[in-house]
Image (tube, rainbow, N blue to C red):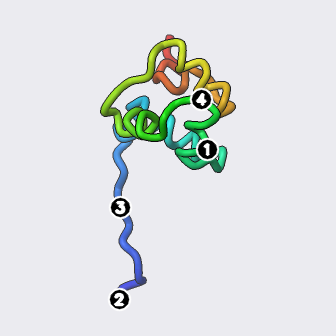
Amino acid sequence: MSIGFTAYFVPSSYMNTFGTRMRAARLTENLTQEELAKILDVNARTLSSWETDTNEPPIKMIVKIALALNCDANHLTGYDGMK
């Protein structure tokens, strides 16, 4: 019996990139890529390239992204919970 949708297994490694953590934080804040790009004063294509891990933002921009998304820069970069 089909229930009308397909469930997908998402491996924990999926959230191990800057881009996927940034996208998740942006969606948590209910922002579109265009809205966040405007806040950060960057092109929406640039922001998209960060979220898809095609490119990485400059170090100075990571703090600005974290502030805009109300999250910790350590979380975005994957260093949260490390000893």
Q: Position of residue 7 (x, y in %)?
A: 38, 67
Q: What residue type is labelled 1?
A: Glu
Tell me whether circle 1 and circle 4 mark residues in contact (CB < 8 Å).
no
Q: Quadrant of residue 2?
A: bottom left
47 vs 53, nearest the viewer: 47
Q: Position of residue 5 (x, y in %)?
A: 40, 76
Q: Which amino acid does label 4 sit on?
A: Leu
| Residue 70 placement, left or right of 1 | right
Tell me whether circle 4 and circle 3 mark residues in contact (CB < 8 Å).
no
Q: In the image, which disc is placed on residue 35?
A: 1
Residue identifier under label 3: 8
Q: Of discs 1 and 3, which sits in the foreground?
A: 1
Residue identifier under label 2: 1
72 vs 62, nearest the viewer: 62
Q: Of discs 4 and 3, which sits in the foreground?
A: 4
Q: In the image, which disc is placed on residue 40?
A: 4
From what the image shows, is residue 50 above or below residue 9? above
Badge 4 marks a residue whose secondary structure is: helix
